[in-house]
Amino acid sequence: MKRLTTVLTVGFLAGLFNCGQKKSSDSTTPPITKLVQNITPTKDQLERRARSEAICIARQIPVYKNQNSLFVDPEAKVTIRTQDEVVDRALALCYIGLKSEGLEQKHLDQMDKDFHITAKMTASEKNYATTLQPTEQQKIDANWRYESLHVLLWALGYVEKLNFPDQMCNVGDDVKIIYNLKEKKFRQNARLRTKNEILDEADLILRLHWACVDARMKNESAPGGLNSSIVYERHYSLNWLIKFMDQEWDKVTTDT
C-alpha cells in the first residue's frame, strides 16, 4: 500500500490532483423518458417537492406543473443502500475514473490488489477494465463517473455539500480522500447520511434533470447554467442510492 500511495502521489496522481477532468459536455445523451404517474402525494413528498421547487425558482429553472406527478418515493417506502454497498461502489468508480485518465496498468493492478477492486465491479465495469484499448467514447463515459463518485463521497459524509451542478467536481480532492485513508479507514470513517438527506437530493436532481430534458426537447440550452451531464450522473447515482425500482448499478434508469 505504501508503494502504491507513493507512486501515485508523486507520479500520476500528483498531476491529477492539480487538474480537472478531461470531459466533453456532449459525452452523455441519456434517452428521454417520462415516468407516468398520477398519485396522491404524501406529506413528506409534498414538502420535499416544495423545497426543491423553491431552489429551482430562485435559479430561474422551470418547474414541472403537474402536481400529481414527478415525485421520488415517500420516505416510508424507501430503503437506502447500506454503507458497505456505497463504499464498495465508490472504490470501483474511483478505479474506473483513474483508468479513463490513462493510469498505467501496473498502477491499476496495484490498486486492484490493495483495494480489492475486481470483486466490487459490475459486469460492465469489468468489461471496461479488461479492455486494452478502449474507445475514446468509452473513456469519456468512464471519466464522467467521477461525478457519480463525488455523489457517493457526499453520501458517505466525506464531501460536506453537493454544490449546484454547474461546475465539475474536483477530481484530485475526491481521489485523495480514498488514497489517503486506504480501504480500511475509508470504510470505518464513513458515516452514511440519513434517508431524509439523500431523498432531498434525489428529489431536487429529479427536477433539475426534468428541466434539462425539457430544454433539450426544445433545442434550448440547459436552464440556470446547469451542466446536463453532471445532472445526469448525479441523478443516476442518487437513484441507485434510493434503490429506484430496485435497479442495480448497470441497469439504473433516470426517468423524468
Image: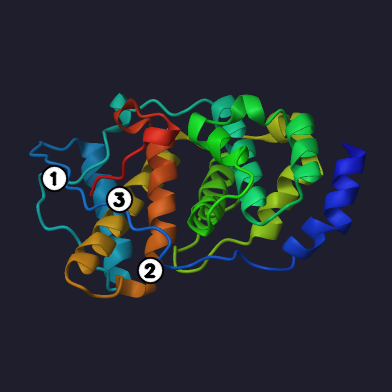
Find disc 3 in the rendering and name its residue. Answer: 206
- Closer to us: 49 or 6: 6
Name the residue at 92% across, 42% down. 3
Alpha carbon of mark 3 to alpha carbon of mark 2: how far?
13 Å
Asked if labels 2 and 3 touch by Cβ distance under 8 angstroms, the answer is no
Name the residue at 22% across, 43% down. 71
Where disc 3 sits, the SS reads: helix
Pointer 1 or 3: first along the chain: 1
Relative image position of residue 12 (x, y in whole percent): 79, 57
Pointer 1 or 2: first along the chain: 1
Alpha carbon of mark 1 to alpha carbon of mark 3: how far?
12 Å
Is residue 238 shown left or right of residue 127? left
Relative image position of residue 115 (x, y in whole percent): 74, 32
Name the residue at 69% across, 68% down. 19
User: Where 200 sits versus 122, above or below?
Assistant: below
Alpha carbon of mark 1 to alpha carbon of mark 2: how far?
23 Å
Residue 27 appears in view: yes
Is residue 230 shown left or right of residue 92? left
Where disc 1 sits, the SS reads: loop
- Closer to us: 246 or 190: 246
- Residue type at numbered disc 2: Leu
How packed mark 1 is, by other alpha carbons closer than 10 Å (few <14, some 14-19, many 20 or more), is some
Find disc 2 in the rendering and name its residue. Answer: 226
Pointer 3 or 2: first along the chain: 3
| Location of residue 164 by image quarter | bottom left
Residue 185 appears in view: no
Q: Which mark is residue 69?
A: 1
